[in-house]
Structures are given as structure tokens and as C-alpha cells.
Image (spheres, helix red, strand yellow):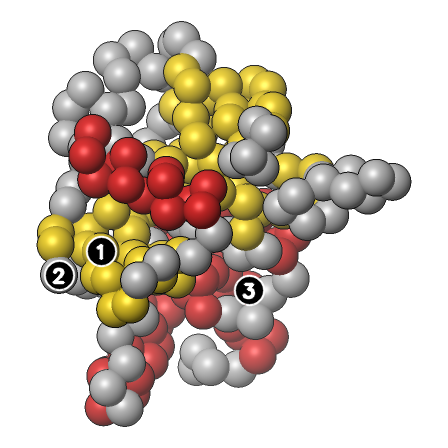
Amino acid sequence: MSDASATPPWPPAGAEHDAFELPLFPLRTVLFPGGLLPLKIFEPRYLDLMTRCLRDGTGFGVVALREGAEVAGAGHPTLLERVGVLAVLDAVDSTQPGILLVRSRGTRRFRLQSQRQRPDGLWIGDARLLPEDDEVPLPAPREEVARALQQAISTLAAQGIEPFLTPHRLGEAGWVANRWAEVLPLPLAAKQRLMEQTDALERLAAVEEYLRGQRPVA
């Protein structure tokens, strides 16, 4: 197994103000900052992409598919969400020829200015970085939400499941909101709205409202 992580100059300096070219990985899921994204790679376009990311110390953009498939067909347009999350490689394992098992993590949100598809099917976007979450402490009235998440983490760990990257930041509002949003059975569009929410406390409040409706929080 080989380990990798993105290092400067990726994303390039000034990416908050100037658009930069970004290879895209459209999925029917929403990646959140700080989230874990395991991938099984076997398509040539993505095998080539992962090789370049490893070689150059770069990453790729994960965007949710709003409509269609990754490869557009006649009469079936592919629509990508405009806001996604940068992903960097943490670990890559080759278990058999032509297949890579990749562990990646979400970092910064970005907004697409435009996108296009190459002849090999790989999507390329022109993107600008969006602001990172402020490290907002978890408010006392929301502590039950964090305790419920800790209980869920412990239950999964007892089953040998580690759904989140460490360290666990249970005292941080944005982190708690993001991790709940990842595991809750919400529609894709709802997860996308939560990911795009720039106010961590508002995002956490929306998650708590859903949790109380489902009654996992006292």
C-alpha cells in the first residue's frame, strides 16, 4: 500500500479569486469537508487520474450528479451540481491488475464556473475555492447532538466499522453537522443543500431538526 497526500502548490495560490482547472469525479453522493470517501477505481479515465494525483501531489473535485450519468448520451444530458468538494488521496492499494482501492478525504468546497467533458469521458471544470468553515465551538444546547453522534461512532466501532476520519472533533459544530449529514438517510438534494450551507450553526440546526423528527436525540 502506498500513502499520499496533496501538498502545495495544489490547489494553486489564489484559487479563492482565480479559477483553476480541476478534474472532476461525478458521483451519486455528496462529499463533505473532512469526509471519508473510499473508491474502487477500474475505469481507464479514473485510473489515469489517480496515477496523476499520486505523481503530482494533486487531487480532484467530487461533484454530485443532479441528472443523468457520468457519460452523457444522446438525449440524456448530464447535469452536475455547481458546488463540490476537493478530494485528496490518503491511501491507494492495488489488489489486482487494473483495479485501485482508493481512500480519499474531502477538504475545501469549490464552485464550478464551467465544465466540459474530454473525449475519454473525464469531466474537467474551472473552479474557485469557497471559504472554509470557521471553527465554531459546539453550543451547549447542541451537546445532545454530539453525544448521539459519539454513541453512533461507538456502536459502529464495535462492529468493526470506522465511518469517519480521525481525529473526531465532537466539540466543533461544523464537524458534527457534516458527519451527521453523511450518515443520515437524506435525499441527495438535501445533503447537497447542507453541504453548501456556509453557516456551520445553521447546518447543525438543520441536522438537529431532522434528528429530533427521527427521535435519535432526547
Per the model, the C-alpha gap separating discs 1 and 3 is 38 Å
Question: With 75 as the anchor, is 107 left or right in this view?
Answer: left
The secondary structure type at the circle numbered 2 is loop
Q: Which residue is drawn at 24% across and 13% down?
A: 13
Task: Kindly identify the residue that appears in the image at 47 percent across and 21 percent down.
Answer: 127
Res 1 label: 2
In the rendered structure, are the residues bearing label 2 and label 1 in contact, judged by CB atoms less than 8 Å apart? Answer: yes
Is 50 situated left or right of 209 in this image?
left
Earlier sequence position, callout 3 versus callout 2: 2
* Residue in view at x 40 percent, y 8 percent: 18
Of 46 and 24, nearer the camera is: 46
Residue extending farthest to the right is 75
Can residue 14 be seen? yes
Q: Which residue is drawn at 46% across and 42% down?
A: 45
Of the residues under marks 2 and 1, which one precedes in the sequence? 2
Q: Residue 30 in the image: x percent, y percent?
A: 50, 52
Q: Which of 88 and 154 is in front in this view?
A: 88
Q: Give the image location of residue 85, x and y in percent.
A: 42, 39
Q: Which amino acid does label 2 sit on?
A: Met
Amino acid type at image mark 1? Val
Q: Residues within 10 Å of mark 3 (few under 14, many from 20)?
A: few
Q: Name the residue under label 1.
A: 92
Quadrant that contains the N terminus: bottom left
Residue 157 position (above or below residue 108): below
Tally of numbered tags? 3
